Image (spheres, rainbow, N blue to C red):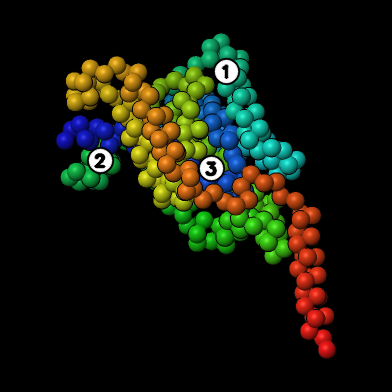
Amino acid sequence: MDTIFFLVQQTWFFAIPLLVVALGGLFSERSGVINIALEGIMLIGALCGIGFIHIFNHAMPPQLLLLCAVLVAGAAGIVFSLFHAFAAIHMKADQVISGTALNTFAPAFCIFIARTFQQTQQIQFENVFRIESVPVLGSIPIIGDLLFKNTYITTYIGLLFLVLAWVIIYKTRFGLRLRACGELPQAADSAGISVYKMRYAGTLISGFLAGIGGLIFVVPTSNVFNADVAGYGFLALAVLIFGQWKPFRIFFAALFFGFMKTVAATSSGIPFLAGLNIPPYIYKMVPYIATLIVLAFVSKNSAAPAAEGEPFDKGKTLKLINLISFFSLTDVVQLEP
């Protein structure tokens, strides 16, 4: 049982960042904007969040410090995602190229900032955020060991984001408008919805969540930030596709990939796997092999938003309205005696 508890606890550490970043991609793509820049936004969010922790390490209680760092990382993600939003929405640039450019820029920028302030590309921090046991809840048999021991507050923040994402997407007027802009932007525009504003909102929410995802990936798994998030931004895109752009399916996809990552990272500590004498680098390949296999079977039936990746052209709305008016007028003329 101890091995099972250990695997579940470690799976949360890897699955929650994937969940949060994939939910960020969900908001962006539901609005019609492909956000390939998730990896770069994670790096910028992690840089600012870890930098905040490094500076204010002993200035406030650990959990309050982590919560403030989460907000800082989210704010940094919003600012960085503005570049992608402006290029993709306002300038109608190719969204894949825009995101790739930001992904290329982000690690170099992180290294430059780190070396400018401390002559090394690694930013160290004291990890004092682990919660050994949540009061009362940690004493619950089995469930307490699985969910409320050796954990971080960021795990519960991630689960909160999951519930909020579902409510916003499916139970609010904002969510309905966001989905309309990703499916039929011309129809949404003709109904009086500002497609530009909704796409900006979706991309900025995406940046907020991806920035937080970068921080909550680094904190549970390391005590140093070295301008790397292990390709989690790209893996989150796979989780998004595997989850069919739906929040709770994304959650289960994140758990699956998180478990694969746990096996890769902790194979030497699992008696059964350690006894197989398989080289460790084979296990490190497991999450990415699983990604390829899953996408090979799932991508054929994936149902992405219809207008995903297409720049919005308001002129097409006017043409649509004129076309509808023309056919309506034609019908009236034909009905006249």
Given the current orientation, which residue lies at the most extreme bottom position?
337
Q: Mark 3 to mark 1: distance in Å?
A: 25 Å
* Quadrant occupied by the N terminus: top left
Amino acid beneath label 2: Leu
Residue 222: tell me if it is visible: yes
Indicate whether 19 appears above or below 261: below
Sequence-wise, which precedes: disc 3 or disc 1? 3
- From the image, state whether disc 3 or disc 2 is nearer to you: 3
Which residue carries the number 2 mark?
146
* Amino acid carrying mark 1 in the image: Ile
Q: Residue at x 53, y 15 (%)?
A: 121
Look at the numbered disc 3 and give the secondary structure of its residue. Answer: helix
Looking at the picture, how far across and down is residue 110, in whole percent? 58, 22
**The quarter of the displayed image where residue 72 is located:** top right
**Res. 18 mark:** none
The residue carrying mark 3 is 25
| Residue labelled with disc 1 | 111
